[in-house]
Structure formats: C-alpha cells, structure tokens
Amino acid sequence: MTLFVLSVLLAGVSTLWVVHPIFARKLALLADVERADVLDAESRKSVALSSLREIEYDREAGKLDETDYRALHGQLAAEAMQAIRASDYVHTPGDEGRHACGFRNPPGSRFCGGCGTRLA
Ligand SMILES: [Zn+2]
C-alpha cells in the first residue's frame, strides 16, 4: 500500500515537473504584457503579437481548447491594439530614423523599408 501511494505521488510530482514550465512561460508572457511601465510600446506590441501567433499554433496543434483560446485571444488582441496605439502615439513624425513616408528605419539603413528610397 505504501509503495502504491509513493508511486502515485512520484507520478504526480513528475507530471507537474514536466508541465509547469509550459504554463509558467505563458503566464510570464501575460504578466509582461500587463507591465506597461517596464516594457515600452514596441516591446509590448511584439510580445502581444508573438503570443497571438503562439496561441494560434497551440489551438491548431490541439494543445489549447476553443474556450481558452477565445479568452486568451481577447486579452492579447486588446493588449496588441493598445500597444499599437501607444506605439503610434510615441513615434510621431520627425522621430529619429523616421523617413518622410512615415516608416521608421533602424539606424544604419541605406534604403527606406517603407518606400525604398535611398537614404543619405
Ligand atoms: Zn520612406
């Protein structure tokens, strides 16, 4: 009897040990999305969009049921929209690296990624 209880306990602990990192990662992503003061708008947008892609893959793979998918998708889509609006607000025309067409080019770019114009 003691052996049975110990084996059930061992099976439970090892299952938690395997499953925990998967859920911890998803929770960490969601927690980061809510920490607007730490991450800037571009980072929050990037995290929200990559999380949306990730839950899409998880749903397609059958790892996420429809109810959980819809709940997560609603949260992440709202966060992505908020981050995109904040990003647009932060990067007004005239910012460093922003071309006349409105595209924000990374430093050292030789051509504009938005319109293809050669940069000085
Ligand atoms: Zn341009």
Image (cartoon, rainbow, N blue to C red):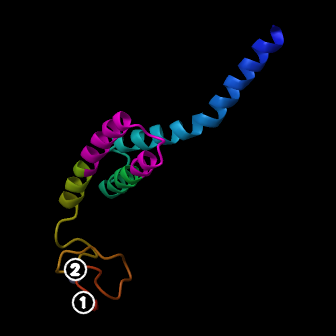
Note whether 73 is above or below 119 in the view shown: above
Ligand 1 within 8 angstroms of badge 2 C-beta: yes
Magenta residues (range): 54-80
Name the spot of residue 78 as percent of width and height, x first. Answer: 24, 44
Q: Quadrant of ligand 1?
A: bottom left
- At label 1, which amino acid type do we have? Thr
> Would you say the residues marked 1 and 2 are in contact, meaning their CB atoms lie under 8 Å apart?
yes
**In this image, 62 relative to 95: left or right?**
right
Q: Residue furthest top?
A: 1
Classify mark 1: helix, strand or loop.
loop
**Pointer 2: what residue?**
99
Q: Which residue corresponds to the image point at 40% horizontal and 40% vertical from the top-left?
A: 30
Asked if residue 22 lies in the magenta stretch, the reply is no
Name the spot of residue 45 as percent of width and height, x first. Answer: 32, 55
Main SS of the magenta segment? helix
Ligand 1 within 8 angstroms of badge 1 C-beta: yes
Classify mark 2: helix, strand or loop.
loop
